[in-house]
């Protein structure tokens, strides 16, 4: 089975882009960048990112005999993300489950040994997506797939097959655009494709467990602002895989603030939103609810989204 046939299987499983990279230790520049990011504390409270550095450095440690990494990107974009502005990736079924199932079906058809990962193993996904020619890293730190944009989640198949690798894209990337840098409410982006999680609204509303969070601008889970203003996302197409849950996008602030554990567990079963737990969601809703009283109406993020749509 050759690379072209495998790519057809992956795109047939719903991926919007697919590429292949040869397994090897990450480049010295990448290693220096990542270790420096951890050392500076920019990963915030996500201590798991500091673990298994040997595996992050060499993906062959995830699968003995691994020779190739098949990288797949899946579009999750939908125009409607609710009046409370939920991160779009979380509106449908948990992408970990959806993508794993789809790639596992492909992997089952391959000879040799394989391992499917979907943001669940110590693998530098965006690095390998770039190496595999799937896209390039934008100034917002996200993978941008030409013709599709950044509204994608990634999944990988590590395999013992020796496959013909793809080359990184020969594209100019973001140039001097900088719209995401100006739009980021926490000024978390450094202008070189890096970010400080401690200033990121997505991290603060999902991963961070403390109470000292900033105003959220009506965004009760995640952010998306840096993607909403990105010119590469102007032609984004609606996903035919991830369908938003009507019960979620119809929730009001009052609904969330009055939510109990039983309803939370039912509503967000097989959903990435369960990551923040009920306590985190209630905290976020409370912070959204106090903004008008604090004199910060939270319209900044919404106006940025309208600017991007109307330009």
Image (cartoon, rainbow, N blue to C red):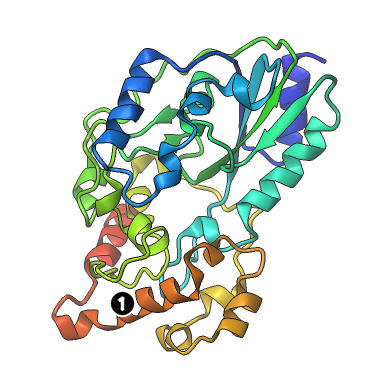
Res. 272 image quadrant: bottom right
Q: Nearer the viewer, residue 204 or 298?
A: 204
Lateral position of residue 297 relative to residue 308, left or right = left
Q: Is residue 218 above or below residue 206?
A: below
One can see residue 13 in this view: no
Res. 99 image quadrant: top right
Could you tell me which residue is drawn at 53 percent across and 32 percent down?
A: 123
Q: Nearer the viewer, residue 106 or 260?
A: 260
Q: Is residue 211 above or below residue 112?
A: below
One can see residue 272 in this view: yes
Could you tell me which residue is drawn at 38 percent across and 55 percent down?
A: 224
Counting every numbered tag in the picture gives: 1
Expressed as whole percent of the image width and height from the top left, the position of residue 252 reads 45, 83
Expressed as whole percent of the image width and height from the top left, the position of residue 207 reads 41, 58
**Residue beneath label 1, please?**
288
Q: Dot 1: what SS?
A: helix
Q: Nearer the viewer, residue 242 or 35?
A: 35
Could you tell me which residue is drawn at 39 percent across and 20 percent down?
A: 171
């Amino acid at each position: 089975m050759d690379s072209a046939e495998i790519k057809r299987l992956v795109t047939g499983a719903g991926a919007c882009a697919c590429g292949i990279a040869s397994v090897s230790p990450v480049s010295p520049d990448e290693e220096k960048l990542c270790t420096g990011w951890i050392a500076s504390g920019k990963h915030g409270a996500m201590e798991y990112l500091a673990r298994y550095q040997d595996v992050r450095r060499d993906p062959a440690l995830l699968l003995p005999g691994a020779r190739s990494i098949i990288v797949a990107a899946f579009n999750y974009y939908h125009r409607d993300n609710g009046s409370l502005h939920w991160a779009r990736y979380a509106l449908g079924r948990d992408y970990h489950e959806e993508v794993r199932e789809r790639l596992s079906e492909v992997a089952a058809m391959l000879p040799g040994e394989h391992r499917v990962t979907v943001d669940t193993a110590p693998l530098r996904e965006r690095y390998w997506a770039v190496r595999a020619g799937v896209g390039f890293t934008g100034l917002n730190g996200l993978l941008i797939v030409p013709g599709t944009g950044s509204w994608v989640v990634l999944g990988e198949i590590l395999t013992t097959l020796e496959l013909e690798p793809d080359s990184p894209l020969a594209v100019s990337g973001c140039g001097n655009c900088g719209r995401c840098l100006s739009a980021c409410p926490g000024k978390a982006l450094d202008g070189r494709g890096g970010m400080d999680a401690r200033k990121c609204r997505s991290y603060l509303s999902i991963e961070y467990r403390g109470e000292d969070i900033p105003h959220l601008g009506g965004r009760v889970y995640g952010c998306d602002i840096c993607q909403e203003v990105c010119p590469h996302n102007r032609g984004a197409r609606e996903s035919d895989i991830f369908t938003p849950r009507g019960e979620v996008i119809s929730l009001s602030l009052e609904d969330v603030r009055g939510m109990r554990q039983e309803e939370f567990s039912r509503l967000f079963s097989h959903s990435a939103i369960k990551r923040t737990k009920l306590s985190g969601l209630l905290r976020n809703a409370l912070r959204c609810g106090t903004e008008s009283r604090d004199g910060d109406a939270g319209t900044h993020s919404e106006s940025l989204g309208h600017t991007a749509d109307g330009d």
